[in-house]
Amino acid sequence: MRVRFSEQAMRCRVSRLELDRLLSGGAVTLKVALPQKHSFSLSVRPAAAVIGEWQLDSDPTGLWLTIPRDALTSLARSPPSKEGIEHAFELSDSGTPGGGHIVVSFDVDLKDGARSPGSRYRGDIADLPSGS
């Protein structure tokens, strides 16, 4: 997983293999070692329910992003493109009038698909795991 931060925005890009892991109920985590034995993590996981909600939680050690399973399935079924899915989270304590927001974008690396000719989402939609 690759992550990019900019002002009031975060972009997560995963490989097809990592998308498969999310679709099967697993999490994808990026852990960055920092000086003085600290680390920072970003973990992306599917919502527990098939039709769940987006969530973004944080503490000093990292961020935890939860994406609805139906949004992940729709992304997997869509034709390959640079566009992914995104969600805006309101920030109640940002210090800006109205609270502000952060926009989180999530997409699949198109170049990764070119390197993985056996990617299972290039074929039939019926091959997608069901969101039981």
Image: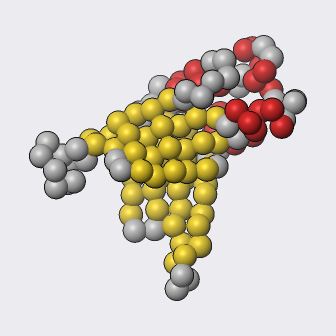
Specify the farthest residue to the right. Answer: 118
Image quarter of residue 55: top left
Image quarter of residue 89: top left
Q: Nearer the viewer, residue 23 or 80?
A: 80
Report the number of discs: 0
Q: Nearer the viewer, residue 19 or 70?
A: 19
Q: Nearer the viewer, residue 89 or 127?
A: 89
Left or right side of 13 for 58? left
Vertical placement of 50 versus 15: above or below? above
Specify the farthest residue to the left. Answer: 97
Q: Residue at x 39, y 58 (%)?
A: 58
Q: Residue at x 66, y 18 (%)?
A: 79
Instruction: Name the image quarter holding the C terminus.
Output: top right
Vertical placement of 11 versus 36: above or below? above
Q: Position of residue 118 (x, y in %)?
A: 87, 30
Q: Is residue 50 visible?
A: no
Q: Residue at x 28, y 42 (%)?
A: 101
Left or right side of 120 for 6? left
Q: Position of residue 98 (x, y in %)?
A: 14, 42
